Image (spheres, helix red, strand yellow):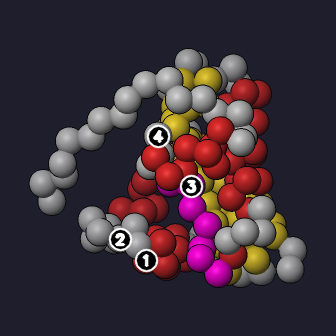
């Protein structure tokens, strides 16, 4: 298997919708059009493809000057433990650092060791307001 990493705009976003379903991230009922808008409005988006199949992806939301929030980093369950997530994280972080942007992220507590192994440190408490959709 050869994973190809691609940044930028896709021709179609149905693979993103399929990945979100496989990850259980479709709770908001986002349409393919919503996911396309989400990707297009991100500062940087990176996709990992196995042939034509989307194996994983991640995004950075940023002002382009100070902070870049890494989000939507996920790997299809069938492709986990192959280093794809770490490579996506490395490339997303490198993109931030190349532009002088500080990479940050929020994660669930069980993922803290995963991100710490890549050099991230806990620095604050994250908060969220419940979505009313």
**In this rendering, would 131 be left or right of 4?**
left
- Marks 1 and 4: which is nearer the front? 4
Query: For the C terminus, which image quadrant?
Result: bottom left
Residue at the spot x=43%, y=77% of the render?
Answer: 21
Q: Is 16 within the magenta?
A: no
Choose between 114 and 4: the one closer to the eye. 114
Q: Please provide the residue range marked out in magenta.
A: 72-78
Choose between 107 and 52: the one closer to the eye. 107
At mark 2, the secondary structure is loop
- Going from N to C along the chain, the mark reached first, 2 or 4, is 2
- What residue is disc 1 on? 21
Q: Position of residue 80 (x, y in %)?
A: 67, 71
Asked if residue 2 is positioned above or below residue 88 in the image, the reply reads below
Could you give the CA–CA distance between mark 1 and mark 4, rounded to whole angstroms?
21 Å
- Going from N to C along the chain, the mark reached first, 3 or 1, is 1
Dot label at residue 106: 4
- Marks 3 and 4: which is nearer the front? 4
Q: Position of residue 131 (x, y in %)?
A: 19, 52
Is residue 33 at all visible to an observer of this figure?
no
State the residue lying farthest toward the right: 2
**In this rendering, would 54 be left or right of 70?**
right
- What residue is disc 2 on? 26
């Amino acid at each position: 298997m050869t994973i190809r990493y691609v940044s930028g705009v896709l021709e179609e976003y149905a693979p993103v919708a399929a990945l979100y379903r496989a990850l259980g991230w479709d709770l908001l009922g986002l349409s393919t059009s919503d996911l396309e808008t989400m990707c297009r409005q991100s500062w940087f988006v990176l996709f990992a493809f196995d042939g034509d199949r989307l194996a994983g992806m991640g995004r950075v939301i940023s002002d382009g000057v100070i902070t870049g929030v890494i989000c939507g980093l996920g790997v299809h369950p069938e492709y986990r433990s192959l280093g794809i997530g770490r490579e996506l994280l490395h490339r997303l972080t490198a993109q931030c650092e190349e532009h002088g942007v500080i990479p940050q992220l929020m994660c669930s507590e069980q993922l803290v060791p995963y991100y710490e192994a890549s050099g991230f440190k806990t620095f604050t408490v994250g908060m969220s307001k419940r979505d009313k959709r």
